[in-house]
Image (cartoon, helix red, strand yellow):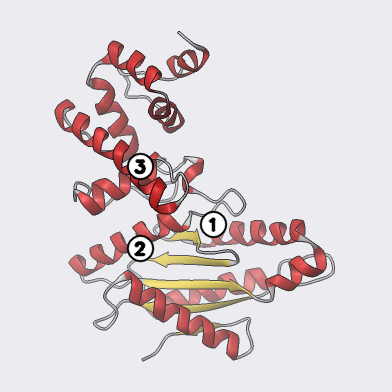
Amino acid sequence: MNEEQTQVSDTIDIKNSQLYISDIEKLIKNRQNFKYYYEIYNDELYSLILLTLSHKSFNKKEAKQFCKEIFKHKFFLEKRLHRDGGVCLATLDYLYNIKNEIYKPTIMEEKKSDFLTDSSTKDGLTNLYLRDIFDVFLKKEIDLAKRKNTIITLALIDIDDFKKVNDNFGHQKGDEVLSKIGKILNDSIRQMDFAARYGGEELSIVMPNTKLEQGYKIANRVRKKIENLKFDGFSITVSIGLSQTSDKILDSEKIVSCADKALYLAKEKGKNQVVKFKF
């Protein structure tokens, strides 16, 4: 047994269904490690891997087949995204978007589930979910809203004049700004909401089962908290664009596009404000 195998042995527990996502990543990356544990646990290993990743139980035959396909899908996503999105993203995308095996994927805050505790799903600076995860979650929530006839509100948030902060005070100070804003978002959203780093200085909040007016109150509360942040030598504000699903906004691309138009209008109107999209 090599050192890495010993580390995994210290944490794997088939009987009590215990396996960490970091251990799964190690098993996937090293075939010898996987072979070593497969010889010990046989197909039960696949069942435990899938239970850990999806929080859903599969029989050994199903789990083995799905795991093999997920591992292939992970490689496909790496090529498409030009980076390693992690086994969590590959599992969620495969089981929900390709196989429709998960009706409501467990992709919530840690209060609801520890499914997304792996570092590959969150931005290290802001502690917000990555854009890839945002895309999957938004699509899933819109599909769910259609079935349940509920409304989703999306907020796109852009830090005003962020380039000036980096240019005048340095990138380290810019990182501090992003970190503090990320904390505000995580502290301000409800348990059912989902906050992500959408781009460089652009952030987002998906608010399920939330009408535009309620979403406006949440977004404006976030805006005020950010405005009250204290920095040495400068202040920070954000502009926020809001849109909601409707009979004219039926997919993730459209709701993002409408929120982006509202965000652009917020910038044009003088920044540091929340603007709701209207047709």
Q: Earlier in the sequence, mark 1 or mark 3?
A: 3
Q: Seen in the image, is 137 located left or right of residue 129?
A: left
Residue type pointed to by label 2: Leu
Q: Please give the residue where the numbered disc 2 appears in the rendered image.
A: 138
Marks 2 and 1, the one that precedes in the sequence: 2
Point 48% across, 84% down: residue: 262
Q: What type is the residue that disc 3 sits on?
A: Lys
Of all residues shown, which one is farthest toward the right? 233
Tell me how far mark 3 sits from mark 2, CA to CA: 20 Å
From the image, tell me which residue sits under label 1. 186
Q: Is residue 89 above or below residue 1?
A: below
Q: Tell me the SS state at disc 3.
A: helix
Q: Residue at x 83, y 65 (%)?
A: 232
| The quarter of the displayed image where residue 60 is located | top left
**Closest to the observer: 178 or 185?**
178
- Callout 2: SS: helix
Q: CA distance from mark 1 to mark 3?
A: 28 Å
Mark 1: which secondary structure?
A: helix
Q: Position of residue 244 (x, y in %)?
A: 36, 77
Q: Which residue is mark 3?
A: 74
CA neighbours of label 1 inside 10 A, class few (<14), some (14 to 19), many (20+)? many
Picture coordinates of residue 5 (x, y %)? 45, 15
The mark closer to the camera, 3 or 2, is: 3
> What residue appears at the point 47 percent right and 40 percent down from the top-left corner?
118
> What amino acid type should be assigned to the residue bearing mark 1?
Asn
Q: Position of residue 18 (x, y in %)?
A: 37, 24
Image quadrant in which the N terminus is located: top left
